Amino acid sequence: MSDPLLDAILQQGAVPAHVAVIMDGNGRWAQARGLPRPAGHQAGMQAVREAVEGARNSGVKVLTLFAFSQENWQRPPEEIDALMALLEEYIAREREELIAKGVAVQFLGDLDRLVASARAAVDETVRATAGGTELALNICISYGSRAEITRAARMIAEDVAAGRLVPAEVDEAAVARRLYTAPWPDPDLLIRTSGEQRLSNFLLWQLAYAELFVSSVLWPDFTRHDFYEAIVEFQRRDRRFGRVPI
Ligand code: IPE
Ligand code: IPE
Ligand code: MG
């Protein structure tokens, strides 16, 4: 726990309530070691634990992790199988630890595409961790932001067609209420590892005013210290939300 950066964060006080992370660079991490890509995904599991600890220690209330995108279904079947097996393993193996730490887990995305055993593990973890009050952990699987927004638009259309909603009532809140992220405030900070400077179809609506932090660290090498670095940088930023500084 004793990390000078963490002390600095807690002293400064203004901690982002919600941090989103694009966990990228597993493949390159493996490649650099002459290992198959799934070895990078395996190594990345430890970094997930580090991010959860970093968030808990610094007082972040919501942590949203991008684990598998809708577009990732286009990867080779061997890699998809390995990733799904690892996710299922992580979800089942960490369950007790997450309960003990007060972490409430949710999974965001098109979960109908998961194989039955992975879906069962997901549902069980959501159920078992529901009472957690320390940290809300959202794991995005089979997630695409455009699909999420399109789904919200379809739900609104259905509500209008059924007479439950009139078009004049369709405002930003009406859209936000129909996104997977409805229960939480928008992310204040987005971290992307591996140096890539793009959103890759992640939380396009919700990140409208997030501060962006790109780390050159490959995801399997990411530690809580790297998480603290992002928070310290966030605390130096001047968020204006389109207004002029006072
Ligand atoms: C992130 O690592 C994990 C997923 C996208 C599932 P990558 O697998 O994208 O690793 P790189 O970007 O190829 O190094
Ligand atoms: C984004 O990473 C998805 C996840 C981290 C789960 P990708 O590696 O799939 O993104 P691109 O292809 O580099 O944009
Ligand atoms: Mg990648």
Image (cartoon, rainbow, N blue to C red):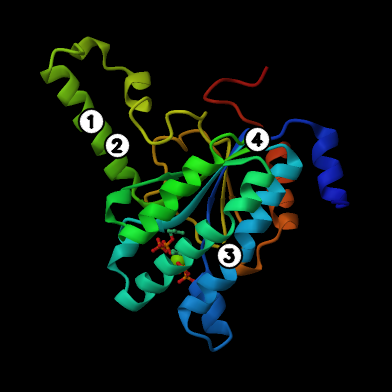
Spatial CA distance of label 2 from label 4 is 24 Å
Where is residue 70 shown, x and y percent of the image?
32, 56
Residue matched to label 2:
149
Q: Which residue is mark 1?
A: 153
Identify the element where label 3 is drawn: helix
Between the residue at mark 3 and the residue at mark 1, the CA separation in whole angstroms equals: 34 Å
Instruction: Estimate the spatial distance between the alpha carbons at disc 2 and disc 3, rounded to whole Å.
Output: 29 Å
| Amino acid at circle 1 | Ala
* First-in-chain label (4 vs 3): 4
Report the amino acid beneath label 3: Met
* Number of residues whose C-alpha sits closer than 10 Å to that of mark 4, classed few (under 14), some (14–19) or many (20 or more): many
Q: Earlier in the sequence, mark 2 or mark 3?
A: 3
The Cα–Cα distance between marks 4 and 1, rounded to whole angstroms, is 29 Å
Q: Which residue is depicted at the point 61% across and 36% down?
A: 132
Residue, disc 3: 45
Which dot marks residue 164? none
Looking at the image, is mark 4 or mark 3 nearer the viewer? 3
Of labels 3 and 1, earlier in sequence is 3
Observer-side mark, 3 or 1, equals 3
- Residue 187 shows in the view: yes
Residue at image coords 52%, 83%: 31
For label 1, the crowd category at 10 Å Cα-Cα, with few meaning under 14, some 14 to 19 and many 20 or more, is some
Identify the element where label 4 is drawn. Answer: loop
Whether residues under marks 1 and 2 lie with C-beta atoms below 8 angstroms apart, the answer is yes
Q: Which residue is mark 4?
A: 16
Q: Residue at x 30, y 75 (%)?
A: 77
